[in-house]
Image (cartoon, rainbow, N blue to C red):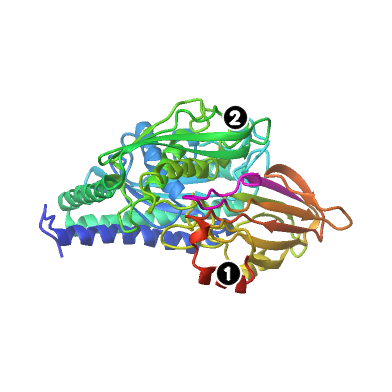
Amino acid sequence: MRHHPGMTDPITIAVLQNRLNAIAEEMGEAMLRTAYSQILNSSRDFSIALIDARCRLVAQADHIPVHVGAMPWAAKALAARFPNPSPDDVYLLNDPYRGGSHLPDLTVFVPVFAGSALMFWSVVRAHHSDIGGATHGAYNPAATEIWHEGLRLPPMRLTENGVLREDLLEMLALNVRHPRDFRGDLAAQIGAARLGEQRLASVIREFGAETLSASIEAMLDAAERYARQIVSDWADGVYLGEAVLDDDGFDKTDIAIRARVTKQGSDVTIDLTESDPQVTGFINSSHANTQSAVAMAFAFLLDPGIAKNEGAFRPLTVRLKEGTIVWAHEGAPVTMCTSHCSNEIIEAIIVALAQACPDRAMGGWGRRLRIALNGTDPRTGRRFIWHMFQARPGGGGSAAGDGYSTIGEWHSAGGIKFGSIEVAETRFPLIFETHEYRPGSAGEGRYRGGYGGDMRLRVEAEGITQANTAGEGVVHGARGIGGGHDGAPHDYTLLAPNALPRKLKSKEINVPVPPGSVIHVLSGGGGGWGDPALRDPAARAADAAEGLT
């Protein structure tokens, strides 16, 4: 059925909004089912977006918010480099200083045309298990410049006249540690983006470009009206918030993100210019990543049902200063930034706006402290890289109730999964001796935070396995809000055979892990919300009965 050109009645708009959302979701399912590596086909560290020719976010699927918020900035960088894209070509970038998140996140773009006019970009961003650089697994706590972190890709054409550039692909694959997974994961991204192109072309044929364009404008405007209606109910004023990172892995400790938030009418201005200067280590943020983190914080305070498109963020103005930790000068290392300092940017903003809309604020979500293992599987003799997505920290409590346990961090908002324990044990020389909630880790409150995890992981690799840690939260736990208590910080210990227990720091490289070692992970809990004295006694009793207090 071909719809009348320009017809933008509410039903047509609603149908098209759901069609676009469904396309993004289908692209995500295709990516999940065709990716090669565990980090994508199990932990789901990828995201989908549909962006229009004006580089505006139109639709997304529920994946990783910190990815999606930066994608319009990547589209702007791509459009500047390729103002007249070819209908048959595929484009690629990962540079954090050109709209990427961090180097492991490769972003694939496929243009979608209505006749000869560019109408959409079908976009897939995915975290690859390795991107070269000095250390395995892409996170390098020893990096002092971005060139220590891996391959840096500006906007580029991956195809010519629709034909894959094998020379370029070979160059990329040659510079990563697991080229098979790299090729397979990149092919999955291209396939998912091509699927989006096909589905969008079908919508254009069915409804016509004029109706579709008018409907998109209506969708964005509706999201803006909804967001402004919500913000208008918040108390006007100027509010301050602060969050603190443990360290940069070098000589800086207690690094502060400072937010000054001005709410006036239906407008919100978030000023991060007083944040600490950029640091030596990889917890600096690029401009696009910080813009994404600010958008996430704002979105978390809106209603869940609001469309998360460009219109929803129109009430928001962001002020940054180059040379600070939230906008490092080009060339600084930034690989950790999608987690930290993203989480702290969100936390500082939530702390500030909790004074304007206390019933919408939530306790802090636990911080990310990852481990990457690089070793040899004795069953196959092949090298492996395993990324730890298990034993995730707890989420924050809120006026809606207790925080979710082991949900993960603010930047992913539950979008990253820890996957099947049994599948991990099958694919890697690992045994999970325990994987359960960590008693006492949740921040107290009227509504407590979620519990962190307690995991004992036995490594049965051949010879010495090398472990890297990368993250935050060993010193500072997730923030309590409105009188709620902070969640417990992380506590990771290496228990090697015939050796004393060794506490793992949050930023280490090449930690030797002998065969038979156990890594004991106690992950942090979420921050509490509200006065703990007001907690329902029955809820306390239930936690005690479960052995969680």
Tell me: residue 231, above or below residue 17: above
Image spot of residue 80 (x, y percent): 35, 32
Q: Secondary structure at mark 1?
A: helix
Q: Which residue is mark 2?
A: 279
Q: Residue at x 61, y 54 (%)?
A: 524
Q: Main secondary structure of the magenta part?
A: loop
Q: Residue furthest right?
A: 498
Image spot of residue 457 (x, y percent): 72, 62
Q: Residue furthest bottom?
A: 545
Q: Residue at x 12, y 58 (%)?
A: 9
Q: Residue at x 41, y 61 (%)?
A: 400
**First of labels 2, 1 by sequence position:** 2
- Residue 3 or residue 190, whichever sits in front: 3
Local packing at callout 1 (Cα closer than 10 Å; few below 14, some 14-19, many 20+) is some
Tell me: residue 465, above or below residue 79: below
Disc 2 marks a residue whose amino acid type is: Val
Stretch of the chain drawn in magenta: 466-486
- Residue 201 or residue 463, whichever sits in front: 463
Magenta residue check for 477: yes
Magenta residue check for 292: no
Q: In the picture provided, is 72 more to the left or to the right than 101? A: left
Q: Quadrant of residue 74?
A: top left
Q: Quadrant of residue 393?
A: bottom right
